[in-house]
Image (tube, rainbow, N blue to C red):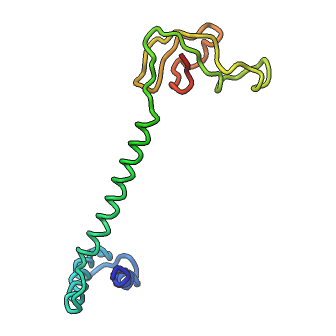
Amino acid sequence: MIQTMKDIIRRCCAYGMEYKDHEGHTHGWITHLPAIELDYNTIQRSTTAKDFHDIWKRECDKVARCIAEEKDYNKKRHEKTHKEPEFRKFYQVLVSTLNFDNPKGPKKMRDSFLVSFNIIKLIGTNAVEVKLSEAFSRKYLVFPVSLVKP
């Protein structure tokens, strides 16, 4: 039945997506949907099949149900593995050297974390602002929680 509906719409679109009537108004295939729906329902009533709205509402409900199930699954999965960071203002933390340039040698040979720095403030639950020493004064002060270790 849905394939029949697609065929009807495809036939409406066969001569272009838009046309102008004798009054100059532009029409597209969307303006024909009510007429297509009426014709389709008339055919379906004579053959005792389902109506247009019954078919399409069921499809929309199925999609909405699948999306809701996926949201629930992802929420449960996130809550199972996620833990809130335990940082507070003035805590000492180590900052990852992942994005730092190291002129002293290769990346494999350097330390994973720098010396400890004090947290100046928390920015939401996902970032911290630290007070860096003079050697790192040109670096940005805000780091994501994933690059900071207590």
Q: Residue furthest front?
A: 80
How many callouts does the rendering have?
0
Query: Is residue 26 visible in this depiction of the protein?
Result: no
122 w.r.t. 46: above or below: above
Q: Residue 59 appears in which quarter of the rendering?
A: bottom left
Query: Is residue 95 visible in this depiction of the protein?
Result: yes
Q: Is residue 144 left or right of residue 111?
A: left
Residue at image location 63% in from the left, 11% down from the top: 115
62 w.r.t. 4: above or below: above
Q: Position of residue 12 (x, y in %)?
A: 35, 83
Residue at image location 46% in from the left, 35% down from the top: 81
30 w.r.t. 105: above or below: below
Q: Is residue 104 left or right of residue 58?
A: right
In this view, the residue in front, 76 or 43, is 76
Q: Residue furthest right?
A: 105
Q: Position of residue 43 (x, y in %)?
A: 24, 90
Q: Position of residue 22 (x, y in %)?
A: 25, 83
Q: Residue furthest bottom?
A: 46
Residue at image location 75% in from the left, 26% down from the top: 107
Q: Residue 126 appears in which quarter of the rendering?
A: top left
The quadrant the N terminus occupies is: bottom left
Q: Is residue 14 left or right of residue 29?
A: right
Q: Position of residue 62 (x, y in %)?
A: 32, 64
In this view, the residue in front, 61 or 17, is 61
124 w.r.t. 2: above or below: above
Residue at image location 41% in from the left, 84% down from the top: 14
